[in-house]
Image (spheres, rainbow, N blue to C red):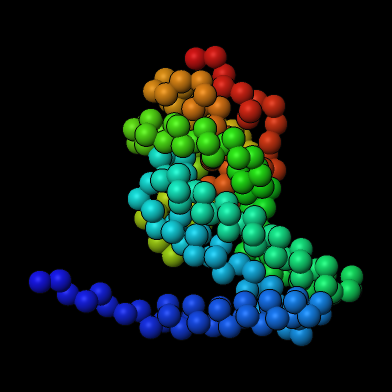
């Protein structure tokens, strides 16, 4: 006999509050007016993205390692819509209010370039869909690369056992050291993926790994975008 699923009233409460904020934001924008509470109003832009972010963090598969492509599509749709929503709020508000609006992006600190690189090009996701199964099969080797080069410096985000997952923050003594670690991790994963799945799958690795680690787009250089001869 099936038992009813437990009701998470905290989640329901948060969802209702978010829906209320969305309603107020939409009403303000429909009237062509700047929201009276900018921080709360613009936070409403990120309701769908926050849900997608949590699904990414809780998924058994990581972005580099065979995450379900529909989860990835949902995340990118939510991200693009959220950023468009913020721009919509800015368009209704005077310039002196824009700094207050930008505070809603604080949770994306060190992540916008990485997410733009992943979500602004539909061909990345379409190619990922074709390579998903092989990337999943190569996942254990890819995760070994992350453990070797990055996970010693990870700052825990609620689950210390999760390792590098999505928008993780890796601490390092200097940016140069961080970038060398990131470069080594990308090269390591690319080598493994190229052996298992071929060149096309390996070419996706930089775009897939960068959103897993905040500030990684800061390190972009030519050798990040090429698979070294193996």
Q: Is residue 30 above or below residue 228?
A: below
Q: Nearer the viewer, residue 2 or 143?
A: 2
Residue at figure coordinates x 84%, y 74% from the top left = 93
Q: Residue at x 50, y 14 (%)?
A: 230
Where residue 162 sits: x, y (%)? 39, 54
Residue located at (68% from left, 36% from top): 220
Q: Using the image, determine if residue 115 lies above or below residue 20.
A: above
Q: Is residue 178 left or right of residue 141?
A: right
Q: Residue furthest left?
A: 1
Q: How many marks?
A: 0
**Residue 2 visible at all:** yes
* Residue at x 60%, y 43% (from the top left corner): 118
Percent from the top left, x then y, of residue 137? 34, 32
Q: Is residue 182 visible?
A: no
Residue 22 in percent (x, y) is at 62, 77
Of residues 182 and 133, the one drawn nearer to the viewer in this rendering: 133
Quadrant containing the N terminus is bottom left
Q: Decide which of 192, 60 is in the foreground and name it.
A: 60
The answer to whether 149 appears left or right of 86 in the picture is: left
């Amino acid at each position: 006999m099936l038992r009813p699923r437990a009701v998470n009233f905290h989640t329901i409460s948060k969802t209702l509050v978010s829906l209320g904020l969305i309603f107020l934001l939409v009403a303000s924008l429909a009237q062509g007016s700047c929201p009276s509470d900018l921080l709360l109003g613009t936070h409403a832009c990120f309701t769908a993205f926050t849900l997608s972010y949590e699904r990414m963090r809780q998924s058994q598969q990581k972005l580099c390692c065979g995450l379900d492509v529909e989860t990835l599509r949902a995340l990118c749709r939510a991200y693009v819509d959220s950023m468009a929503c913020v721009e919509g709020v800015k368009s209704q508000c005077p310039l002196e209010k824009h700094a207050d609006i930008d505070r809603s992006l604080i949770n994306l600190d060190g992540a916008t370039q990485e997410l733009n690189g992943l979500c602004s090009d539909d061909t990345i996701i379409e190619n990922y869909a074709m390579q998903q199964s092989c990337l999943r099969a190569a996942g254990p080797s890819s995760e070994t690369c992350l453990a070797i080069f990055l996970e010693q410096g990870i700052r825990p985000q609620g689950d210390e056992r999760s390792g590098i997952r999505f928008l993780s923050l890796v601490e390092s003594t200097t940016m140069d050291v961080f970038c060398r670690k990131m470069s080594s991790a990308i090269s390591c994963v690319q080598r493994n993926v190229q052996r298992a799945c071929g060149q096309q799958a390996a070419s996706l690795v930089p775009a897939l790994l960068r959103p897993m680690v905040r500030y990684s787009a800061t390190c972009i250089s030519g050798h990040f975008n090429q698979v070294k001869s193996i």
